[in-house]
Amino acid sequence: MALIAAPELLSPYFRSLALAILADVALAVSWAFFSGPSRYLSLATGAFFGAGAYTTAIMGGGVPWPIPVLAGAVVGCVMALVVGVLALRLRGPYFAVFSFGLAELAKHVLIWYETGVTGTVGRLLLAPPGPWTLYYTILCLAALAVTTALLLRRSRWGYALIGIGADEERAETLGIHTTRVKIGTFALSAAFMGAAGAAMAPRWTYLDPQVFNPFVSFQTVIMALLGGATTVAGPVVGAVFLGLASEILLLKFRYLYMFGLGLTLILVVLALPSGLVGLATRLRAAPSPLPRPQP
């Protein structure tokens, strides 16, 4: 209820911050759909997010608002299907490197097309929807992402993903069509990322190919790992925590922002492999110390 009433209660600054954090929640949770249980490290978030944002810019302001968001989801899904057929036969670092190059490839293809074919680079966003419309759109996306994560986790498809992450070859021998499961989940994840990019695009009045930013990919990974990528609540906690911490760093210690992100990633990998949610679970499950006997 507080999130629904937030636009009326918050100042424009805090409403903008809430919007950014909700978008981070949608990205982190959707990334964890696939990479959490399967243990395939995807660094393609920036590509899908950028494709969704550019979809909104191309469609312009003459289209009813929900349509660009749906179109962004479709574009992200189609991209993931094409990439998944090619890349999801790779494993380990090979898939991570391939997915990382996707954002750079998309950016440079778009630069080539706009400079060589259209003659202009970048697009103006005309007649964007109002801030309340954007807020509730992103809120719905974040809520839908969390709901999908819960349903996926309790389904046979989710158990198949966990089996792939534990031992993919054994999962194949047990009759799981691993390629189909991986590609389908990867496409579902990318659909949410594309929709998030399309919904966030109106925040900027001008978009160019730099929107395909690999930093988005790394930030999403850090958020999910910080909270705990193998849980539903973990990416939400990580997105909220890192979103607030990033805002403080950018306001007070701008030059330490990237250093702080890098240090966070190192600490998570070394000290918190199961994230903040996993740490909290272990602390709750730890037996309380026995009282000392009285003399």
Image (cartoon, rainbow, N blue to C red):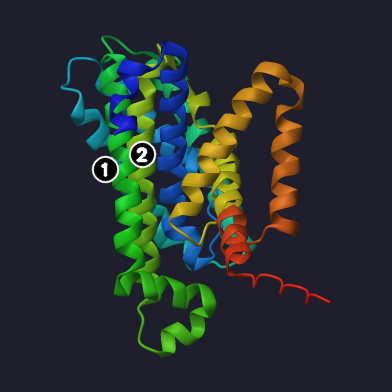
Amino acid type, callout 1: Val
Q: Is residue 263 above or below residue 279?
A: above
Q: Position of residue 103 (x, y in %)?
A: 52, 39
* Residue denoted by label 2: 194
> As rendered, which of 32 and 226 lies closer to the eye?
226
Does residue 104 appear anywhere in the picture? no
Marks 2/1 in contact by CB < 8 Å: the verdict is yes
Element marked by disc 2:
helix
> As rendered, which of 212 and 22 lies closer to the eye?
22
How packed mark 2 is, by other alpha carbons closer than 10 Å (few <14, some 14-19, many 20 or more), is many
Q: Is residue 287 left or right of residue 116?
A: right
Q: Is residue 274 left or right of residue 86?
A: right
> As rendered, which of 225 and 66 lies closer to the eye?
225
Element marked by disc 1:
helix
Q: As drawn, which residue projects farthest toward the right?
A: 295
Residue at 45% from the left image edge and 73% from the top image edge: 162
Q: As drawn, which residue projects farthest toward the front?
A: 295
Choose the circle earlier in sequence order: 2 or 1.
Answer: 1
Q: As drawn, which residue projects farthest toward the left?
A: 64
Q: Position of residue 43 (x, y in %)?
A: 55, 48
Which quarter of the rendering shows the N terminus?
top left
> As rendered, which of 6 and 225 lies closer to the eye?
6
* Residue denoted by label 1: 74
Q: Position of residue 202 (x, y in %)?
A: 35, 18
Which quarter of the rendering shows the C terminus?
bottom right
Q: Is residue 206 above or below residue 99?
A: above
CA separation in Å, label 2 and label 1: 8 Å
Amino acid type, callout 2: Gly
* The quadrant where residue 192 appears: top left
